Amino acid sequence: MKVSVWYCDNNIDIALPDSGNVDIFDLPSRRLHRLPASHWLNTSVVPPGLEQFLADAQRLVVVVNDAHRPTPTATILDNLKHDLKFDATTFLVATGLHSPKSSAPREKLFGELPVAKGLVVHDAYDTSELHTFGEGEKSVRLNKVLDWCDSTLIIGSVEPHYFAGFTGGRKIILPGCASFADVERNHAFAVQSGSQPLARDGNPVWEDIQNRTRVLDSKKRYAIQVVCDHEGNLFFASHGDWDQSYDQACDFVVANYAFDVAEKYDIVISAVYPPLDRNLYQLQKSYENVAAAVRDGGTILLISACVDGVGDDRFLKIAESLSNTGEISGAGNEALIMGIHKVRRTIALAKRVDLVLCSNLDSLLLDHLPIAPRSDVQAAINELVSKYGDNCRIAVVLDAASQVLYHHAA
């Protein structure tokens, strides 16, 4: 049988055995209905609660995702433009630890909206732009415009996240608008067992985000949360209270993007779609999201060209240090070294399953990671089918960064 997957900015056909033991987890855009034409995000008729919130705001901050997320921010904001008071509004781009220079292309995020005078692109490393909220363990340093404002509107997209449970919600504040040190502190929890896709309560990363962003709960707050695909097509939208709207979106994701498989697979082919197919750093969620459905000794085959190279290379340097010395070089607590969670989680997973990556990367870049490089997609598939036999169980997950496979034993 043949299946079309995304690779090198094109759809390519891969050949799989005709044994009947192949399951295809199709793109959400082929399974789900888009928001109807009558929905307010398609009509610009703003809901009364949101309309009143915008009218009451005297110093409004609108927090939006950067260009590394699929959120159709420009489309959403275009529907609000008649209700926004641009002279009293600051637009804050939540970059997390992404480069401010490359993460906020104005046209892509804002279209033709007049945001230039009120645009702030967060820089986690610029301490002059940060303000400390709270005290002690609940303290957090956030972009200072969140101190200036009296009202905060967050606009985010919700999808599975491999250690924070889900994207969206308060995650746009922490890590999105936080200092490097606070992001590092939060991500240190990612090596704990409770930090898994779709996990909220009991997930230390998720709980830290909820606890420390409550320093903003004295502000007037509103949220727009959407579920979309990598092309920005909208399948679900909620609005209102930060937490209630987020929970509603999470419930939709669980119902439509998570699959409980009856039996674990020998091979899971994890096809990575834009924008997360661009570099090595972004790949992790695409194998962690499917790992629970792979049997011990099985293989996850990642298909991602990584045409932009490695991306943030901190985790590669950590992997090299671990490989050479068994320790992390440099001063400081190992658990708080940014990127250590990616390496530790990958090493732990590779003790149970094999990881193989088809990409355009130089194979030397993977020397210190437990990921086997391949350059020919079909040859890699043939190699695995030969290893496990023509009757092996195979899953093909399209857009694996947004879909989760899991297995509950009977």
Image (cartoon, helix red, strand yellow):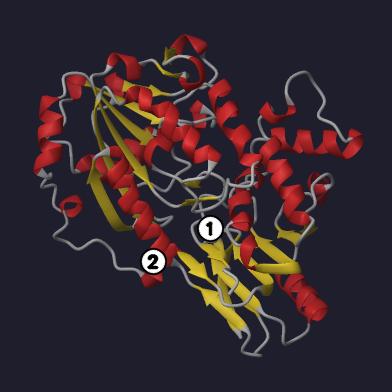
Q: Quadrant of the N terminus?
A: bottom right
Q: Is residue 11 visible?
A: no
Q: Residues within 10 Å of mark 1 (few under 14, many from 20)?
A: many
Residue at coordinates 59% horizontally, 48% vertically from top-left?
278
Q: Is residue 220 left or right of residue 68?
A: left
Q: Residue 225 bears which disc, if any?
A: none
Number of labels in the image equals: 2
**Badge number at residue 29:** 2
> How far across and how far down the image is residue 230, in percent?
43, 55
Placement of 300 over or under 96, stated as above or below: below
Of all residues, the one furthest to the right in this rendering is 325
Residue 36 placed where, x, y %?
20, 63
Secondary structure of the residue carrying numbered label 1: loop
Residue 385, horizontal then vertical, whole percent:
76, 79
User: Could you say where residue 379 lies in the image, as x and y percent from the top left?
Assistant: 77, 72
Q: Does residue 51 lie above or below 8 as drawn?
A: above
Q: Earlier in the sequence, mark 1 or mark 2?
A: 2
Please, is residue 383 above or below residue 344 in the view?
Answer: below
Residue occupying image coordinates x 58% and y 68%: 407
Q: Which residue is mark 1?
A: 273
Q: Locate residue 268: give its quadrant.
A: bottom right
The amino acid sitting under disc 2 is Ser
Q: Horizontal placement of 229 versus 3: left or right?
A: left
Say if mark 1 contacts mark 2, CB within 8 Å: no
Q: What amino acid does circle 1 point to? A: Tyr
Q: Is residue 257 left or right of residue 237?
A: right
The quadrant holding residue 85 is: top left
Pick out the residue farthest to the top.
128
* Residue placed furthest toward the front: 410
